[in-house]
């Protein structure tokens, strides 16, 4: 256990992997000399050299495709895509190649690729760099989607992802990078397990990634109002830990899903549907969602904050259930 | 709420036949109660003045023992002041602070149960489906509470799990109280078809409960004997000849009377098994099994069957069948039978081995009289033969006593003119 930031946690996990396995290498835009757009790979070029820490051209389709090729060839590539909006340029590689090649090759070839990218808003980067599209990726069979929300999970899930035989996408909410916390103790983590962040009996608050902290703050406010909220951190959107979700709702009889992404067709809807299917008779109130406002993300700080879920809006949604 | 049958656990008040202030005599029918088996006229246990009606007619199923009304008996002092309204009626609508949150707003221990019912669910008013959460519906089913009769404390008047739990904890009196305030006007009346289906369901449940208890607890023994009905039927035909159809007797009445008289001879079969011992009854009230249209059956009492004339029994029998099928029996008829008689004769059945109605001690069964070869004085002759059976509770009696009883029935039926 060590105290470090989320940024350092991602870096230390990559460093551990680079040291432990010669097949691991990192590539992406500005990951080398610049140390990464968010400073995550700072210092890695010096330690591992330009062969394993590779700066790429500004062509997501190319370097994600190269990562897929390297994985097919026996390597364990980590590909960093600067922000989630740029991953749209590599959608064909991710959805049509990485996710399908095991199937298309009749099981002969796997793609053990880790694609990391920053996601989410809240940093005044406006409508083109503030998306939360991880729910889109969770739609795709053949890839796994992890969303670490804590320092420990950033390390643990990255190391777990590198052990997967198939592609994993890791979404790092950009506001989390300076977050400080305890790193894990090196015990391997398993992808697909949610975490119970707070026990409660009155309502299940279900969140992931950048929404977790706000949800935990909302739970604290609710406690002062006499509502004992349970907080579940999904950690992995695919596979989804429906077991924990349903067990929690069976106890609390109410659920609120908090997600930064737009509401329509968002991942919160998927979680909600799972609850309807698996815990209908346990529900004492309709499942509620707190999602991002359905607008292109505003630049102005006040408007941007208003467009994102906040502890106050979560508290209000919970109050509406009683 | 009187227990109108050994297996009755709850009933609904359908109608009051007396008003507060009215003078009533012991035995007067004061209300109609719907049990799982019938609509029963409830007779007053005492004479006096109907002081106050505590439970308005409604859909609420009230556990046996729930006070329904106050009767001031003769000689009791006039109350100094009119009785205070029951607690539930006095409670103001529960305040609902908009910003407050339920667990803080309604700490289960702090709010008197009755207050929960005070607010009428507005959303349910227009006859739409009552708002009840899935969890509340499920729990209400488990607790056999009608969740639509509760006033919901959730958003838009939704009945929540907590409302159901509180209603269950509030107990019978508190459950009864809200009926007058919420239900009838606020909710859509169930359609007659629904009500009939629900009644059928409850009757089935009651029969299931009673028969399961019987087979679980009562070690039955079964006896059968064949009775030559030749003399009885011939006597009956002769007696009915020339009589108006309405005055004619049916052979079932002979069977009832013969059974009742035979029970005088073997009284150990007449009565109840209560507190681990048999309690014989001096009175012989024959519970007559009557099948109902649409299924199910009741076995109300023909009182003092051993003492009544055949004509009187016939009238009583016809009246009982008519009212049983109209779901309109009296409380004493439901509660009093000391033995049950079942006859499947009209269905062409040869013999019936019945299950005793707890806590009674015996059940007597009769099949159809059928023309069969029979040996009389060394000659094979055609005779109308009927199989009489006895199901006895072996805790109370043994086969020997049972055999004496069946022999007595046979003997009595050979002298129909004495019945």
Image (spheres, coloured by chain):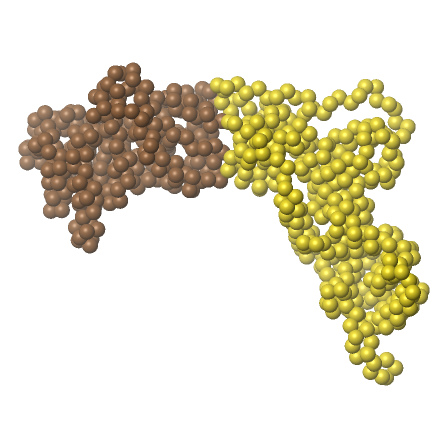
Chain colours: A brown, B yellow
Task: Locate residue B13: give its quadrant.
Answer: top right
Q: Measured from the top left, where is residue A112 in percent x and y?
A: 18, 44
On-image quarter of the N terminus of chain B:
top right
Please tell me which residue lies in front, B379 or B194: B194
Residue B152 visible (yes or no): no
Which residue is at 20% across, 47% downward? A100
State which quadrant residue A298 falls in: top left
Q: Compared to B320, does A319 lie above or below?
A: above
Residue placed most toward the observer, A210 or B94: B94
Camera-side residue of A291 and B327: B327
B180 displayed left or right of A108: right
Left or right relative to B129: residue A305? left
Residue A177, given in percent of the width and then of the height, sits at 22, 24
Residue B355: x and y in percent read 72, 59
Residue B419 image point, x, y percent: 91, 63
Q: Is residue B172 above or below residue B276?
A: above
- The answer to whether residue B66 is seen in the rendering is yes
Residue at 71% from the left image edge and 39% from the top image edge: B12
Which residue extends farthest bottom? B378
> As drawn, which residue projects farthest toward the left?
A50
Residue at 21% across / 44% down in the picture? A99
Query: Hey, which residue is sitting farthest right in the picture?
Result: B418
| Rendered residue at 49%/22% (across/down) | B101
Q: Left or right: B73 with respect to A275?
A: right
């Amino acid at each position: 256990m060590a105290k470090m930031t989320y940024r350092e946690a991602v870096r230390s996990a990559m460093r551990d992997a680079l040291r432990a396995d010669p097949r691991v290498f990192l590539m992406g835009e500005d990951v080398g000399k610049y140390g990464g757009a968010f400073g995550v790979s700072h210092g890695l070029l010096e330690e591992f050299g330009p062969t394993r820490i590779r700066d790429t051209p500004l062509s997501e389709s190319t370097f994600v495709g190269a990562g897929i090729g390297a994985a097919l060839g026996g390597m364990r590539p980590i590909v960093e895509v600067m922000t989630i909006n740029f991953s749209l340029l590599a959608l064909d590689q991710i959805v049509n190649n990485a996710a399908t090649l095991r199937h298309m090759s009749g099981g002969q070839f796997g793609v053990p690729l880790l694609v990391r990218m920053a996601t989410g808003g809240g940093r005044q980067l406006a409508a083109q760099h503030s998306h939360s599209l991880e729910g889109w990726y969770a739609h795709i069979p053949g890839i796994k989607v992890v969303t670490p929300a804590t320092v420990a999970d950033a390390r643990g899930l990255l190391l777990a992802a590198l052990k997967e035989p198939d592609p994993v996408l890791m979404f790092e909410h950009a506001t989390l990078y300076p977050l400080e916390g305890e790193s894990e103790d090196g015990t391997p983590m398993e992808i697909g397990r949610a975490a119970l962040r707070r026990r409660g009996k009155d309502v299940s608050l279900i969140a992931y990634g950048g929404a977790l902290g706000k949800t935990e703050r909302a739970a604290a406010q609710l406690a002062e109002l006499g509502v004992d909220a349970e907080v579940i951190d999904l950690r992995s959107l695919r596979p989804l830990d429906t077991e924990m979700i349903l067990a929690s709702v069976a106890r609390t009889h109410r659920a609120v899903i908090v997600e930064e992404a737009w509401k329509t067709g968002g991942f919160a809807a998927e979680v909600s549907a799972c609850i309807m299917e698996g815990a209908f008779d346990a529900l004492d109130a309709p499942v509620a969602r707190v999602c991002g406002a359905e607008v292109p993300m505003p630049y102005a700080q006040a408007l941007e904050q208003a467009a994102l879920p906040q502890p106050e809006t979560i508290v209000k949604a919970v109050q509406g259930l009683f | 709420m009187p227990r109108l049958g050994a297996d009755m656990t709850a009933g609904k008040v359908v109608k009051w036949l007396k008003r507060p202030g009215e003078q009533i005599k012991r035995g007067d029918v004061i209300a109609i109660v719907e049990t799982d088996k019938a609509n029963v006229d409830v007779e007053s246990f005492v004479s006096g003045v109907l002081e106050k009606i505590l439970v308005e007619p409604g859909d609420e199923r009230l556990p046996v023992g729930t006070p329904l009304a106050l009767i001031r008996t003769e000689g009791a002092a006039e109350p100094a002041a009119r009785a205070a309204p029951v607690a539930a009626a006095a409670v103001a609508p529960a305040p609902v602070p908009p910003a407050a949150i339920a667990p803080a707003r309604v700490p289960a221990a702090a709010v008197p149960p009755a207050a929960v019912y005070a607010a009428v669910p507005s959303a349910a008013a227009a006859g739409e489906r009552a708002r009840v959460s899935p969890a509340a519906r499920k729990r209400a089913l488990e607790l056999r509470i009608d969740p639509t009769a509760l006033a919901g404390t959730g958003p838009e008047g939704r009945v929540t799990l907590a409302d159901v739990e509180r209603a269950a904890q509030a107990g019978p009196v508190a459950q009864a109280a809200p009926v007058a305030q919420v239900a009838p006007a606020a909710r859509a009346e169930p359609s007659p078809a629904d009500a009939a289906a629900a009644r059928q369901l409850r009757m089935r449940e009651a029969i299931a409960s009673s028969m399961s208890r019987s087979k679980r607890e009562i070690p039955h023994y079964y006896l059968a004997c064949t009775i030559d009905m030749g003399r009885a039927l011939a006597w009956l035909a002769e007696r009915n000849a020339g009589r108006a159809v309405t005055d004619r007797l049916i052979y079932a009445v002979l069977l009832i009377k013969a059974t009742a008289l035979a029970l005088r001879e073997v009284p150990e079969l007449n009565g109840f098994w209560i507190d681990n011992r048999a309690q014989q009854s001096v009175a012989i009230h024959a519970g007559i099994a009557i099948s109902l249209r649409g299924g199910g059956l009741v076995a109300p009492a023909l009182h003092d069957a051993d003492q009544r004339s055949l004509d009187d029994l016939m009238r009583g029998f016809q009246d009982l069948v008519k009212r049983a099928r109209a779901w309109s029996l009296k409380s004493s008829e439901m509660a009093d039978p000391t033995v049950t008689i079942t006859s499947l004769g009209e269905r062409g059945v040869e013999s019936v081995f019945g299950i005793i109605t707890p806590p009674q001690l015996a059940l007597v069964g009769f099949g159809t009289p059928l023309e069969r070869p029979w040996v009389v004085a060394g000659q094979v002759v055609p005779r109308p033969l009927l199989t009489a059976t006895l199901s006895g509770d072996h805790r109370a009696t043994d086969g020997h006593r049972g055999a004496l009883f069946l022999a007595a029935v046979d003997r009595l039926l050979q002298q129909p003119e004495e019945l």
